[in-house]
Amino acid sequence: MNYLSIDRLSKGFGERTLFENVSFGLAQGDKVAFVANNGTGKSTLLKILAGKDIPDSGEFNFRDGIRVAYLEQEPVLAGSEDQTLEAFVKQASADILEVIRQYEEALDMSSNGSEESLKALERTSAAMDSREAWDFDRRLETMLGRFGIHDLTQRVDTLSGGQRKRLAIALTVLDTPDLLILDEPTNHLDIDMIEWLEQFLMQANITLLMVTHDRYFLDRVCNQILEMHNGKMYRHNGNYAYFLEKRSQREDALQIEIDKAGKLMKKELEWMRRQPKARTTKSKARIDAFDEIKTKANSGKKQGELKLDVKMSRIGGKVLELKKVYKSYDDLEILKGFDYTFKKGERIGVLGKNGVGKSTFLNIITGKEKADSGKVNLGDTIVYGYYTQTGLKLKEDKRVIDVLKDVAEVIQLADGSKLTASQFLQFFLFPPDMQYNFVSQLSGGERRRLHLLTVLIKNPNFLVLDEPTNDLDLLTLNKLEEFLDNFSGCLIIVSHDRYFMDKLVDHLFVFEGEGKVRDFWGPYSEWKAQKEEDEAAEKKNKVAKVEKKRVEQKVQSSSSDKAKLGFKEKYELEQLDKEVPLLEEQVASLQAKLGESSLPYEEIQDASEKLGLLTGELEEKMYRWMVLDERR
C-alpha cells in the first residue's frame, strides 16, 4: 500500500539550489533513511513534507486517511511558553482526547437503546480502536516517564533544548501515526533512550522516513536508504552496510567512465582544433557529442578530503591531575572525591544519563567551571581544543572565511607545510564560493563543521569533544574519525553515538549518579555486554534469594504440619481460596496477550514484567495454600 508519492520536487534559496527534480515513494512498512551531505536540503525536504515549507516546483501526495507525525531537528513548541507541561500535553493530544470524549458521550447515550445511539457507539468504538485510545492515560504516563518527564507542573519555557526534544519525541510516538517523519531523532537523547527508541521503531507495523547520522541506529532500524548525491536520488534496498558497499561500487564504476571520457576527450579535442570551417550535419553532431564528453570528463573532480593532520603542540611529562574533586548543585552530586591522573595519548569516552553532569565535568577539566573542592592541576604544555555542545556563538552577518581568520590566517601542518585560511576551509569541504557566504546561510551541520575547524586550527594536544557528532553528515563523520584515529594527543569524548565511541576510545568514565564515576576499560560495546551480564547475574541472585526464602518457609511449616489451624490461619486459607484462582486467571490472560504477534514492543515489555511478578506471587500463594489445606 503506497503511503507517500513525491514527484520532481525542487527547492533553492536565492542562487543556491538545494535539490532539484527529486522523486521517490514510500510504501506501508518501509523504514527509510534519507542520506545526503550537509547543506543539500535534508531537513528542508522533511519540512516540505510536513507542510512547514513549500517547494519551488513539483508535488507530493499522502494516501487519503493516513495520519502523519513530524519531529523537527530542533522542536519549537509554538504557543506553549506560558503553559505548564500538563496543559501543553493536553493541547498536543487534543485529537485523541476528542476521540475519547466522543466515545464516552456515545456510551452514555447508548443506554436508551436507540438505533442511532448504537451506531454512534459502534462508530466511536472503531475510532478508539484506530487511535489505540483505550489505555491512553496509562500509555501517556509510561511514555513521558520513559523520556524522563515526570513533573507536569513545570512550565514549558523552563525546559532545556534536550528536554524539549524528549517531550516532542514522546508525544510524536504516543499518537500512533501511520507514518513517522523524524529529523535527527537521536540528538539530545542518552544511550538508554536511544536503544529504547531503536527497539520501538523496529516494530513491523511502523512506517518511517528519517534523517539520522547515528550509524548503529540507522543500520538496525532501516531497511532502505535514499541517497541524494550531486542532485540525483539513489535507492538502496538494504541497511547502512549494504548502502556503503553499493555506493563504493557505483563510485568505482563512475570513475572508470570518467577516465574513458577523459581519454576520448583528448582525441576529440585534436579533431576540434583541425576541423574545416565548413560545417556539415555530421560535424555538428560530433561537436555536440564532444560537449557531452567534456562534461563527463570534467565531472571527475573528487569530493574534498578533510585533511586535518594539523601540527600538535608537544606534551610534557605532566598532563592533567584531578585530586579529591567534589562538585554538586544543591541535591545533585556530580563528582564525589574524584581522583584521576591523565597520561599521554589517553582516549576516554564519557557515558551517563542526561543530567548527571557530563558537560559540567568537561567544564571543570577545561577551567570553565570551578570545583567545590579538590585540585585540578594542568600541565604547562597542555593546549586544549574544546568542542562544545552549544556550538559557535557568531554574528549571522559574518562571512565564513572571516570566522576562521579571526582564529588564524595561516595554519601549519604536521609535515611543516602551511595553508592559508581559505585553503584550510577548502580541505574542510567549504569550496571557495561558499567561503564568502554569511553564517546565516549555513545549515546546522555546516555550522558544526566550521566550529570543529576553529577548534582544530589551534593545534591542540588535548581535545575535549562534547557531542561532536550532532548534525554532521556521514562523510564528515567518517573523515573526523580518521583524523581522531591518528591524533596522538589526549582525547575525551562525550557522545551518544555508539559507533563513534566504539571506534575511538580505549576506556570509559561511566557517570552512575550520586557523584559515582566508574572507570571501565574497554569500548562502549564491551561495557554494554558487561552491563547486561551484571543485570542478568543480579536477576539470578534475586531469584535465588526468593527460592531460599521458600525453602526456609517450607522447613518452618513442616514442623507445624500436624498442628491444628488457628483462627488467623483459617481466615488466611479462606482468602487464598479466593486469591489463587484470580491470580491464575491473570497469569493465563497475560500469557495469551504475549502470544499476539501484533502487540507493540512497549506492551510486550510491560506484560512480561507483570507476568514475572504475578507468577512469583502465584507460586508463593499456591505453596502456602497447599501447606494450610493439608492441615485442614
Image (cartoon, rainbow, N blue to C red):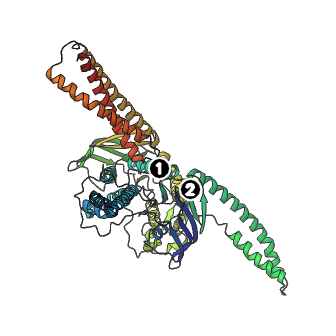
- Point out residue 354 in the picture as x, y percentages from the top left corner: 33, 51
What's under tag 2, amino acid-wise?
Gln
- Point out residue 405 in the picture as x, y percentages from the top left corner: 45, 70
436 relative to 317 in the view: left or right: right
Q: Secondary structure at mark 2?
A: strand
Which disc is residue 224 wearing?
A: 2
| Crowd band around label 2 with a 10 angstrom C-alpha radius: few (<14), some (14–19), many (20+) | many
Q: Nearer the viewer, residue 70 or 258?
A: 70
Compared with 420, 237 (above or below) is: above
Q: Nearer the viewer, residue 139 or 254?
A: 139
Which disc is residue 367 wearing?
A: none
| Crowd band around label 1 with a 10 angstrom C-alpha radius: few (<14), some (14–19), many (20+) | some
- Point out residue 26 in the picture as x, y percentages from the top left corner: 54, 61
Compared with 157, 583 (above or below) is: above
Name which quarter of the figure residue 151 lies in: bottom left
Compared with 190, 619 (above or below) is: above
Which disc is residue 203 wearing?
A: 1
Quadrant housing the C terminus: top left
Residue 315 appears in the figure: no
